[in-house]
Image (spheres, coloured by chain):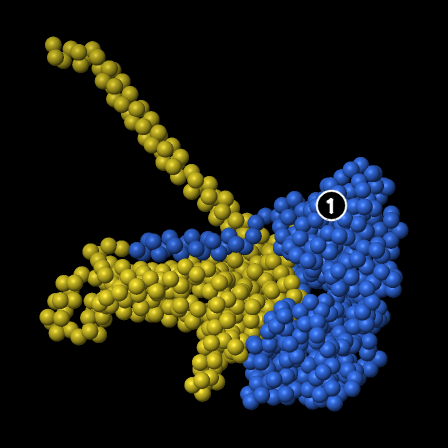
Chain colours: A blue, B yellow
Amino acid sequence: MRRIAAAAAFFAALGLAACGGSGGKSSTTAQTSTAAASHQPVTITLWNGFTNRELGVVNQAVAAFHASHPWITVKSVGGINDDKIIAAIRGGNAPDVAQSFTADNTGAFCSSGGWIDLKPYMDASHINASMFPQAVQTYTQFQGKRCALPMLADTYGLYYNKDLFKKAGITAPPKTMSELTADAKKLTVRDGNSFKVVGFDPAQGFYENAPAHYGPLFGANWVDGQDKSAIAKNPGWAEFMQWQKGLIDFYGFDKLRRWQAGAGDEFSASNAFERGKLAMAIDGEYRTAFIKAEHPDLNYGTAPMPVADSHPELYGAGYVTGNIIGIPKSSAHKDAAWELVKYLTTDQHALALLSNGLRNVPTTSASLKSSELTPDPRFKVFLDIFANPKTATTPITAAGSANQELFQDYVAKWQAGKVTDLQNGLAQVDKQIDAQLANSAGTQVP
Amino acid sequence: MSTAPLAQGGPAPRLQVRDRRAAKRKAAWRRRWLVLGLMSPWIVGCTVFFIYPLLASVYLSFTHYDLLSRPRWVGTANYAFMLHHDPQIWNAVKNTLWLMAIAVPLQVLFAFGVAGMVVRAKSGVGFFRTVFYLPTLAPPVAATLGFTYILNPATGPVNTVLGWLGIDGPLWFESPSWSKPSLVLLGLWGIGNTMIIFLAALLDVPRHLYESAQLDGAGPLQRLRWVTLPTVSPVILFAVVIGVIEALQYFTQAYVASSIVGGGAGNAADPANRLGYPEGSTMFYPLLLYQQGFRFFNMGYASAMAIVLLVVAFAVTLLIIRNSRRWVHYQGGMR
């Protein structure tokens, strides 16, 4: 028995170590060709993350591409995530074009050379990144290397329930955080130990509540001029945390958690805002499509998110992120792949078609004014947020969203009332982020 | 006469001996090749799936490796980061130690207790055996989903029933102090495998030992202490060792529970954003390893973590086995 136990221990332990990973393939320098693409018939593969109805919309755009580029046939494969893309690049069998929902991974794709540098292609096609708003340019490149282009974006604003507003005697959506707090309190209906209606739930981790989505509303930056984490140096973050904790305390953290547990899955018809259990929420433009499909009778409005009382000039701006698309280094048909990338990211017709179908924000500044866009005043609010010059995004790192996740961990402790010295804690978070990013970049930890 | 052939044919028997030896050697080689041939699937499997990845992990632990570009040698930087800088590692170690110290003993005790009850059942033994074994057949992901539903603090049946009794049920997976106990409950529910092994061991305890103990006036507790426990002690050791190794590898249930209960939080397409929810209380060592390797593109560091885990798992197991000499009894002195 002892021998069996020892053997079992050995092999189980071996299995643990074995899950650490295996040797990598050598990276090859991207072979770029700026020569005019030949019109030889070619078939390329597009991997994207969309499924079901949304995949159908993407395939419509792909069909439109084929109509205008008849020599390029595109095999579109949906339901792909970044793990699959990375594994395929490692295995040398990646698609010609890859689309990802995770802009946070741009840094990894660019710095590793997993996705090729698009600059030579853009130069040859006379495409300038300035056709995209500044924030969008930020999340599609890393340290000056542009290996991705944006394929539709998500911007975040305020959703509010007009019926509940009327009941509470509120006539207009709040514009500052103190107005938001006041309205949230008015809208909240308690029910014994729980709530019938929550005015606004500011607990981070709930639905779309993440510090990244609030930063632009408080004028809070992530990094300083030297690319060092600067959360403690930025008064906006502390102001944001004080504000959200203040409103959480109005509800009671545990009570709010209990309510959240029954609030319904965010991406389902039982979403609390859609059912009128949550009067206001921060959410992306895509919610307009969900509500239309799931609760078409909901009487709601949209507006930019309220901003910090100390920064009224920020009203109208918000957080932006989006899908990225690029060419994996192993693509055998990079010229044809570029034609597809160019089409899906810069062609007005394609962007309007995708935006109408997916109800995401089209990504070039010009496409916002496209006459092909289906008009919808509630969706238009998000187009305006997108176009706002103060709209911001999160910095791209080589370590995915490590900076955001470390900060989120701290915010989680703070909102639970487990932090005594906020400022000191923020300084610690900065140190942790810098150490993590240094290790992830393979440089000496400072 | 009789000596002549010997004298003359001296070399002949030597040749025979040599032939015999050669034939024997040949047969031995043939046997070796046969054994090797029969073992080759295992040898190939072990080399490809264990030895190569293990050696690769050792090498990668001294490199910076982002999964996509060639690993770059960084010496002991990953180990230094682990010991001095990683903000999450001590929390992950603490959580994993918690599992080893609390969940493992509870699971062994519970499996032993259930087996003890089933073995005593007068009728319906097969039924009880099946009932207690059945949860083991549920895939871990499905079982975890089921528990997050049952233990939902707002809508779950457990808190609803507690509410009828006037008890404000805990927040279960939503609370940092209850999330690990909730996972323990899930673990206790699925102790079928260990229970079956205990059951076999309990049925194996010689009846005559109980009878003589009873004749000597031993009560039920004394019989348990002096007859049952010593006899099943090798199985207890086995259960503890396997339990500890499973605790060190604990991943799926914590990953699923935190993803489901953690809800939205940022990127909707990415459940891994909620690893460790709530407040890092379910961030166990293997989850951190996964996060570093696959989410932070830090596979060099993840490999270093894997190597440390291997060494720790090995050391802990050896420690338990060495310590077990004092309390494990092998029948017939067999070890």
Q: Splitting the image into 4 quarters, where does residue B295 fall? A: bottom right
Q: Residue at x 31, y 68 (%)?
A: B114
Residue B156 spot, x, y in % from top left? 49, 76
Give percent across and percent down for residue A220: 76, 75
Q: From the viewer's perspective, is A423 left or right of A367?
A: left
So how many labels did they put on this image? 1
Q: Is residue B27 left or right of residue A433?
A: left
Q: Residue furthest front?
A: A297
SS class, disc 1: strand
Q: Nearer the viewer, residue B59 or A80?
A: A80
**Side of A145 relative to B88 (left or right):** right
User: How packed is label 1: few (under 14 Cα within 10 Å), some, or many (20 or more)?
Assistant: many
Residue A118, image x, y percentages: 80, 51
Q: Eyeballing the image, is A305 above or below B70? A: below
State the residue in front, A319 or A115.
Answer: A319
Residue A78 visible in the snapshot = yes
Judging by the rendered image, the residue that carries numbered circle 1 is A74
Chain at tag 1: A
The answer to whether residue A403 of the structure is visible from this angle is no
Q: Residue at x 57, y 49 (%)?
A: A22
The front one of A13 and A172 is A172
Quadrant that contains the C terminus of chain A: bottom right
A55 to B253, vertically: above or below: above
**Residue at horizontal 46 percent and vertical 43 percent from the top:** B45
Q: Residue at x 54, y 60 (%)?
A: B305
Quadrant including the N terminus of chain A? bottom left
State the image quarter where residue A401 is shown: bottom right
- Residue A38 placement (x, y as % from top left): 83, 38
- What type is the residue that disc 1 sits on? Val
